[in-house]
Image: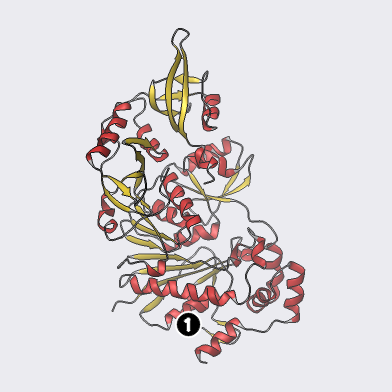
Amino acid sequence: MQAKKGGKLVNLNDKDLKALNNFASELNLSISSIVSNPKKLKIEGEKYNDVFDLPIQLEGIINSFESIYTTGFYLGYIKNSKFYPGLTLLRRVSRLCNNEIDCIKLNKKGEKQFLYGKEVKDNIISFKLGLSVVLNEIDEPIGWGIGKVINRKKGIKIVEPVKDLGWYLRRGG
Amino acid sequence: MNESEKENKIFNYEISDEAKVLAEKYGYSDYIVERYIKLLGEEVVDLLEINDVPMPQTIRCNDFLISCDELEKRLKGKGFKIQKIPFLPHGYEIIESPYNVGATHEYLMGYYYLQDPGSMLVVYLMNPIKNSFILDMASAPGGKASQILQLTRDSVKLVSVELKKERIKALRSNLQRMGFSSYVILEGDARKVSIKNPDMILLDSPSSGEGIIRKDPKRKKSRQRKDMKKIHLLQYELLSKAIDIVKPNGEITYAACTTAIEEGEYVIDKVLNKGKLDVIKIDSPIGDKAYEEFNGVRFDDRVKNCIRLWPHRHGTEGFFICKLRKVEN
């Protein structure tokens, strides 16, 4: 979800920061490893806010515009006090996989299923419970997914897609 | 010759029988073919013939995210046959593709952009300077905007303006997909934007699109002759706005994907009349000097320092490219 019209860029309030913090905690990260200068786009009448990391060099000119369509590094959006990560944030967080955080890794078949927006069951190379960056065999990020154990006794795990790179194609650019 | 006589000669030239015959044969509006004849003489058939051959697909490797050698290796590994374009540092032609080049994992990762060669050349000639303040006045779908950010390593302050609602989403999606962040997108008419003193401006102007007939054959007939005046006026107004707001000594790169005099030489000739401007001589690896005269109308001498790309001579889209500098005070 990203805005259909222009708005004003403002600072995040405490509630927004908490939402971002909760998301970072789910990944075992601090908020500072995700964003250095968070801002949100406030649009009259919208129930969600896009969130950006604004490069410092843009601070001055941003304030000179009454309304902007988008800017900076897109992180995701906040709706009902929950943060939903976007695909661009994937690249930033995936650099921390294998070192600072655990990530889900899929084999070639799993990657294909995932990029078609399908649930992956038997093609998981490494697994993490809950929200995670999903990588392909060569450690490239392919989307956000949720690791779930659906049968504890048999140890059956699945990866549910949240947002995958194939989305760019499905939505038509 | 006064301005209205000039305008009459530019927009209302007579159509010869030869033009009518060729227009019928190749499926064009006759005023376009008559202009080709006036500009190219006997070469006109070469252009009409090549315009019936589809453009090869070309891509720009995004070395902000991946080295071009690595991208080349990966695409070759997937069965693509690609070839470096000698005059474009990041340009490749797709010779053979096992599937759609816009559906690879590398594309989705932002490792390349589908962009025509003339369009790529415009930004190399613009030569955007790192850390500068740049305005892109007609930005969607973002090929040139992303190239500016790529060449400057995402260091500039880029303001991208786009009027068309249906195109602005693609602009956003492309800049995000390719990993850039140092930009602001504004929705609106660039003639009304309130920006002061950018160091550089790119105006890749809305145009008749006559330059991309190889990609979109509908352009042979889609514009009526009377539309050319409206398009010319829009280009003139956009360029006048750019001249007003660029900082003293700042540079404006004007480009139009067209072969029409009305959208190229004549626009530049008119803005040069305003004073406070100079044409920067372009040092381009390909291209011809712009025309100094058309149908008895002699343009400002400096117009010849702009360049033209022709499909049949240069293998690109048809393009008019000009670099201007605002004279201090």
Q: Secondary structure at mark 1?
A: helix
State the residue at coordinates (67%, 63%): B51
Residue B253 spot, x, y in % from top left: 43, 67
Subunit that carries the residue with mark 1: B
Q: Position of residue B181 (x, y in %)?
A: 35, 48
Does residue B33 appear left or right of residue A153 in this picture? Answer: right
Residue pushed farthest front?
Answer: A45
Relative to B5, does residue A166 appear above or below in the rendering? Answer: above
Residue B325 lies in what quarter of the image? bottom left
Q: Residue furthest top?
A: A153
Seen in the picture, residue B280 relative to A33 is either above or below; the reply is below
Q: Is residue B264 visible?
A: no
Q: Residues within 10 Å of mark 1 (few under 14, many from 20)?
A: few
Task: Report the coloring of the rendering.
Answer: secondary structure
Of B289 and A88, the residue lying toward us:
A88
Residue sitting at 66 percent across and 62 percent down?
Answer: B218
Q: Residue furthest bottom?
A: B1
Q: Is residue A34 visible?
A: yes
Report the quarter where the C terminus of chain B lies. Answer: bottom left
Observer-nearest of A104 and A66: A66
Look at the picture and state if A95 lies above or below B59: above
**Rendered location of residue B194, percent (x, y):** 33, 67
User: Residue A172: horizontal and vertical position, in percent?
Assistant: 54, 45
Q: Is residue B67 left or right of residue B22?
A: left
Disc tally is 1
Residue at position x 64%, y 84% in the image: B13
Report the amino acid beneath label 1: Asp
Residue in front for this viewpoint, B215 or B221 = B221
In the image as oriented, which residue stretches furthest toward the left?
A14
Q: Which residue is mark 1?
A: B301
Quadrant in which residue B202 is drawn: bottom left
